[in-house]
Amino acid sequence: EKGGYATFMEKEINDQPHAVADTLLGRTDVEGRLTLDEMSISEEQLKNVDRITIVACGTAAYAGMTAKYAIEHWTRIPVEVALAHEFRYCDPIVNERTLVVSISQSGETMDTLMAVKHARELGAITVSVCNTHGSTIPRESDAVLYTHAGPEIAVASTKAFLAQITACYLLGLYLAQLRGGSFADDAAAVMKELAQVPAKIETLLGQMGRVREIAKFMADTRSVLFLGRHVGYPIAMEGALKLKELAYIHAEGFAAGELKHGPIALIEPGQPVFVIVPSPTSEHGLHGKVVSNIQEIRARGARTLVIAEEGDEAVEPFADEVIRVPATSPLLAPLLTVVPLQVFALWLSTAKGLDVDQPRNLAKSVTVE
Ligand code: F6R
């Protein structure tokens, strides 16, 4: 059942190429146009959408935060990401033209379910991005877009996260296509690139030996920081969450630009910091800005564990470790950059002799508010 792996989590991390490929499967026609047949909401209604609110918790919310960058870029529809338990009680601004997208692996998270019910009462159109057929949240939504990650058994979410990002990207591209305009033409190009991602994840998984080694020697570490920018920001937070859950280590993810506004005070000699470097092809010179951040923290003694694209030489002088990921376009990078962080948490937890699949105090689905 664990496919020869010692834990479900290790298996599920290695399942990720399939999780992404299967979520992409059957969602385009012969011309490469997105079809999303299961979206039982009229095209007319979807064309009228003028704002999107994503509701989710935990890792699913980080998938939503990642998707926000892509959906806004492709559709120019404003996207807000709300933690489901906050959304429900903050008098949300929602109407018939609001598309409320819930993201949930289990489909049973009570906080998310309550948010969806509330959104429907307010007249919103609700779409569920969900991994579990026949679960409650899709039943309570107007439409569902299933992620096809397969059953996720380990408490900590890994492959569902990649599938959630993939499904939300499909939704964004579909909306862009419906609305026409300049980004509609790009949808086909993005789909082509998405189709190459599973093979890139596979390659990346084959290169994780060094990450495992680094984790093994960090069993005594008390705190780890994660920095990222743009789509790397939610990935930094996801990396921190994985480490808290699995290795019970204090971990925090920051937006790299926020460093000088406070968190840099935390840097002292020996402090391990993962930095997710944007692709050198990112807009607005973000790559150079993050490379400067690495330099700044390194000068203060941080131990820099840098996740950078293949061929990005600029990071070399300031990195204690460089973890390479295959090149892809900036918006798709999260499907790759998160993998070493999952692998790191897995092996650090293992090095500490902890129960990887069933961390203390956590349940796979949280069915109480
Ligand atoms: C993190 C994790 C949790 C879940 C969250 C939402 O590894 O597993 O943060 O992501 O509880 O669960 P679902 O997606 O089932 O609604």
Image: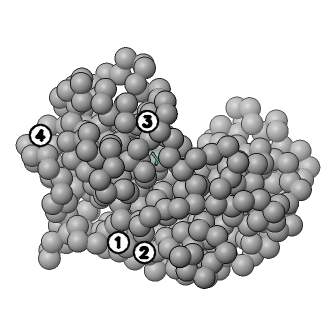
Residue 103 in the image: state x and y as whole percent. 39, 46
Measured in 3D between alpha carbons, the distance from the residue under mark 4 to the one under mark 3, in whole angstroms, is 27 Å
Q: Residue furthest right?
A: 269
CB under 8 Å between discs 2 and 1: yes
Sequence-first tag of 3 and 1: 1
- The amino acid on which the numbered mark 3 sits, given as a three-letter code, is Met
Query: How far apart in space, not on screen, are marks 3 and 2 (Cα)?
Result: 28 Å
Coordinates of residue 60 in the picture (x, y in percent): 47, 47
Q: Quick check: 138 above or below 163? A: above
Distance CA(mark 4)–CA(mark 2): 32 Å
Mark carried by residue 45: 4
Question: Which element carries disc 1, helix, strand or loop?
Answer: helix
Closer to the eye: label 3 or 1 = 3
Tell me what residue is drawn at x 59 percent, y 55 percent. 156
Residue 8: x and y in percent read 59, 68
Q: Nearer the viewer, residue 20 or 246?
A: 246
- Identify the mark nearer the N-term, 4 or 3: 4
First reached walking from the N terminus: tag 4 or tag 1: 1
Q: Are marks 4 and 3 in contact (CB under 8 Å)?
A: no
Left or right: residue 126 versus residue 339 is: left
N-term-proximal mark, 3 vs 2: 2
Q: CA distance from mark 4 to mark 1?
A: 28 Å
First in sequence: mark 4 or mark 2? 2
Q: Secondary structure at mark 3?
A: helix
- Foreground disc of the pair 4, 1: 1
215 and 275: which one is in front? 215
Q: Which mark is residue 18?
A: 2
Return the residue at label 3: 110
